[in-house]
Amino acid sequence: MNNLRNLRGTADLMPDQLIKWQNVESILREQLQRSSVKEIRTPIIEMTELFERGIGETTDVVSKEMYTFLDRGERSCTLRPEGTASVVRAIINNGLSNNSYQKLWYMGPMFRYERPQAGRQRQFHQLGVEYIGSNSPRSDVELISLAWDILQKLGIKNLNLEINSLGDIEDRENYQNSFIEWLESNYKLLDIDSQKRVKKNPLRILDTKNSETQNLLKNAPVLIDFLSQKSLDRYALIKENLDFLKIPFIENVKLVRGLDYYTHTAFEITSGELGSQATVCGGGRYDNLIKQIGGNDSPAIGFAIGLERLMLLVGKNFEIKRDIDVYIINKGMRAEAMAHKLSSKLRKYDVITEMDVSGSSISKQLKKANKCKTKSIIVIGEEEAMKNQFKIRLFSNNKDKEKIINLDDDDGLEKWLKNIIPDYSA
Ligand code: ATP
Ligand code: MG
C-alpha cells in the first residue's frame, strides 16, 4: 500500500488549505450573483469529438494535452481540458442557442497532460464566465471589467491587462496568406513543432513557447495590420470604454491565445508574482464556435481564471477561519445523551458546534476546548445531568456570562446564544 500516491500533477486540497479556497470561492460567487451571471454545471467527461471540433485539432491542448480514452463501449471520451466547449454544447443540447443574451459561469476541475510545475498542474481548477448571444463591443467591455473587478475585489495588486484584436475570419485569412509567405522564407529557422504547423495551422505558431521562434517572430507581419476598418473600429471602441472605466491595459499584438475558436477581442490578465506561469485569467470572443459545434450562429465572449494561480495571489486575510462557537463537554451516560440532543438543537442556529466524544475526564475535555479556541463551552457533568440541566459559559473570565439552563428551556438557550452571536439567525 505504501507506494499508492496521487497521480503526478494532481493535488489533494486539505481542510486547512480549503479555508482559503472556500473564502475566495464565496466572494467569487457573490460577485457573479451581483452581476446576474448564472451558474451552469456540465459533465467533467465529454465525447472527444467535442474538443477536437471546438478547440481545434492542431492546438496544443487537443494534440498533446488531453486525457482521452475508450470507455467500455469503445467510445472515445475525454476529461474536459477547458469549460467553454461544454457550456456551448449544453446550450445547444438544451435548445437555448438562439435565446437572447445569456450570462453563465462554471467552476470546477479541468485536465491537461502538461509538465507539472509551480502554477501548472494536470488537474487544475477554473472559474469560467461566458456571455452568449451578443456581438456588441459593450458585451466585451462588460466581461473584461467583470474579470478585472473580481480580481480587485480579492485585493490582488499589480495586475496587467493585455489586450489584442484577432479580427474576423476574413481578416485572419488575409493575414494568414502573408504570414505563410513569411514563414516559408524563414522555414529553416523555425522549431520543429512550428515547421509542422506551417501547413496545418500557421496561426498557432504565434502561440509558441519556443523562445528562439518567439524571437524570430518579432520580425513577422502582425495580425493587427490586416484588420478591416470595421474590426479596428470595434477594437477602438473597446479601448475607449476601458479608458473610461479607468481599467489600465497594455496592447499586445502578439497575444493570440491557445485555442482556435477566438475572434476579435483576446485578453489576458497577468501578475509578475506568478513567475513564468504568469497568466491568471485568459479570455476572448468566440463568435464562430457555437455554429461550429452545431448551434445557431450566436456570438459570444468568455474568460477563465485559473484558481490555483489565483490562490497564490490572494493575501493571508483569506486564510482566517471561523472559530468554534460552542464546545460541548460531557461526562457520563445521561450527559452524553443530553449532549447529542443539544448538539442537534444548536444546528438550528448559525453557530459552529463541536461535541466532545472522547469520554475522558471533564478537565481533559476542558483542555481540548481551550486548545480549539472555542468562544464558549457547555458543560454537562453527572450532577447537571441528574437535574436535566447544563452549564453554559463564555470562555473568558467573565463570570456574569455563565448560566445554568434546563435542557428543555429553548427560550433560555436562544437568549443566551445572543451573547456569542449578536446577529444569530434562527
Ligand atoms: P498557459 O499559457 O499558462 O498554458 P493557457 O492559455 O493554456 O495558459 P487557458 O486555456 O486560457 O490557459 O486557461 C485559462 C487559465 O487557466 C490560465 O490563464 C491559467 O490561469 C489556468 N490554467 C491553464 N492551464 C493550467 C494548468 N495546467 N495548471 C494550472 N492552471 C492552468
Ligand atoms: Mg496552456
Image (cartoon, rainbow, N blue to C red):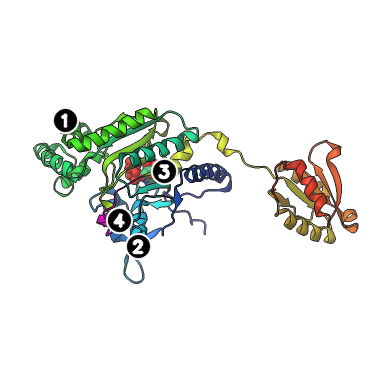
The secondary structure type at the circle numbered 3 is strand
Identify whether 9 is placed above or below 157: below
Query: Which contiguous range is marked in magenta?
Result: 290-302
- The reply, left or right, for residue 400 in relation to residue 26 is right
Question: In percent of the image, x 28 and y 60: which residue is there?
Answer: 49
Task: Compute the Cα span from label 1 to label 2.
Answer: 45 Å
Q: Which residue is mark 4?
A: 51
Task: Compute the Cα span from label 1 to label 4.
Answer: 33 Å
Question: In percent of the image, x 80 and y 49: which residue is there?
Answer: 378
* Ligand 1 has an atom within 8 Å of the beta carbon of the residue at disc 3: yes
Task: Compute the Cα span from label 3 to label 1.
Answer: 32 Å
Q: Nearer the viewer, residue 83 or 293?
A: 293
Assess disc 2: are there few (<14), some (14-19) or many (≥20) residues with their C-alpha within 10 Å of its C-alpha. Answer: few
- Residue 325: x and y in percent read 72, 45
Assess disc 4: are there few (<14), some (14-19) or many (≥20) residues with their C-alpha within 10 Å of its C-alpha. Answer: many
Q: Which residue is mark 2?
A: 93
